[in-house]
Image: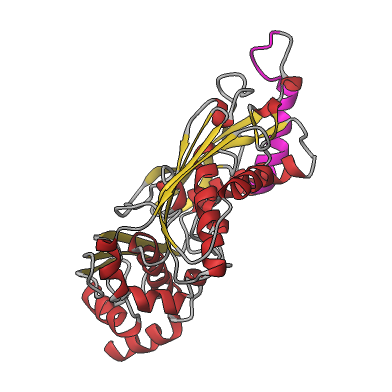
Amino acid sequence: MKGKYYLTSESVGNGHPDKVCDQISDAVLDSVLREDPMGRVACETFITTGLVIVGGEITTKTYIDVQKLVRRVLTDIGYTDHKYGFNSVTCGVLNAIVGQSPDIAQGVDAGGAGDQGIMIGYACDETPELMPLPIVLAHKLVQRVEEVRKNGTLKYLGPDCKSQVTVEYEDGTPKRVDAVVLACQHTEEILDKTGKKITDEARNEIIKTIATPILGKLTDSQTKYYVNETGKFVVGGPQSDTGMTGRKIIVDTYGGVVSHGGGAFSGKDPTKVDRSATYMARYVAKNIVAAKLAHKCWVQFSYVIGRADPVSVMIDTFGTGKISEQDLVDLVRKNFDLTPQGIIRDLDLQKPIYQKTAAYGHFGREEFSWEKTSKAAALEKAATALR
């Protein structure tokens, strides 16, 4: 895009009800894969005031103590006191898990995709993570909230929080942060005398302790801050909002900068291409950008249940590519195994790695295999031969 424009992305903390559910579902998946790497998992979680329901379809040789697992996840997040409206010790936990459909299994067992669908990957060179700047900053803000909450720097913070960052761009280049939104659950101790809003001192402390270290020189005197804009955020977490697995798909991916595919991620084992092929699409896009074959790269795959090879592969570099999109598609098909079994093998996905993905985004974090740029050199060499 030319000229000046503004892009906004949001993130949520690990205590947000939807993210609590994502973490529980992925903790179930990790528990299965730890003992049974071939286990099949499609796990959904629902949370509301005082209650967690875990359901879905699981086929495994191992045993999962769902009650114990759920309470551990809630404790690790910080829901350990009634003052936050939810307590990991006293909440109810209902297990409603059944086995996987044999009609699905017969296609997956033969090496085919576990479902139909479209999967999207993206990368751009505006940050070291090769991710859009707004979502990178939004994630870092809520990570900072968790850090200062757990280390006691801001003892009045609760587990639930959200962030939002608006970045001003000029001719496609990020220039400054125009607006910052922080919604942080807190105890009553920082309310003013009216009891309807937090004190100015607390507001300034939140900005100084959370926003300033993350945003630094990207802000200026014109940057706008919106902190608990309704006045207060005492009642939060599952007490104030129900949560469900898979409801924060834009937070999980690219912050709305590009489109999202057809499905969510958490609670699904890697035979589900909703998850694994989306990881591969990110791996492909990131390696193309890392090879300097484009400044931006959008990748779309599509699959049909029971078949291994993707139905379609599409690439868009938004006019920034060094070679044609069709040449890039050809390079991708030659250098990446896009079958479900190939994706699982090459990205090493049958391991208990998934709970870590369930908060603060699935992309832009070097700890995951789909973030490696191990194909960049081969892509660059092959592209050179085409020029």
Between residue 38 and residue 362, name the one nearer to us: 38
Q: Residue at x 28, y 80 (%)?
A: 333
Between residue 19 and residue 185, name the one nearer to us: 19
Q: Is residue 246 left or right of residue 80?
A: left
Queried whether the magenta region covers residue 203, the answer comes back as yes
Residue 101: percent from left, percent from top: 30, 58
* Number of marks in the rendered image: 0
Q: Residue at x 61, y 33 (%)?
A: 91
Q: Is residue 249 left or right of residue 319?
A: right
Between residue 173 and residue 52, name the one nearer to us: 52
Image height of 108 relative to 95, above or below: below
Q: Is residue 53 left or right of residue 116?
A: right
- Image quadrant occupied by the C terminus: bottom left
Figure colour scheme: secondary structure
Q: Dividing the picture into quarters, in which one does residue 79 lie?
A: top right
Residue 249: percent from left, percent from top: 41, 48
Image height of 378 relative to 50, above or below: below
Residue farthest to the bottom, as pictured: 385
Q: Residue at x 46, y 51 (%)?
A: 252
Q: Residue at x 48, y 36 (%)?
A: 243
Res 185 visible? yes
Queried whether the magenta region covers residue 359, the answer comes back as no
Q: Dividing the picture into quarters, in which one does residue 239 lie?
A: top right
Residue farthest to the right, as pictured: 152
Residue 371: percent from left, percent from top: 50, 69
Image height of 250 relative to 124, above or below: above
Q: Dividing the picture into quarters, in which one does residue 212 lie?
A: top right
Image height of 11 relative to 350, above or below: above
Residue 62: percent from left, percent from top: 53, 64
> Most prominent secondary structure in the magenta stretch?
helix
Magenta-highlighted residues: 194-214
Res 226 visible? no
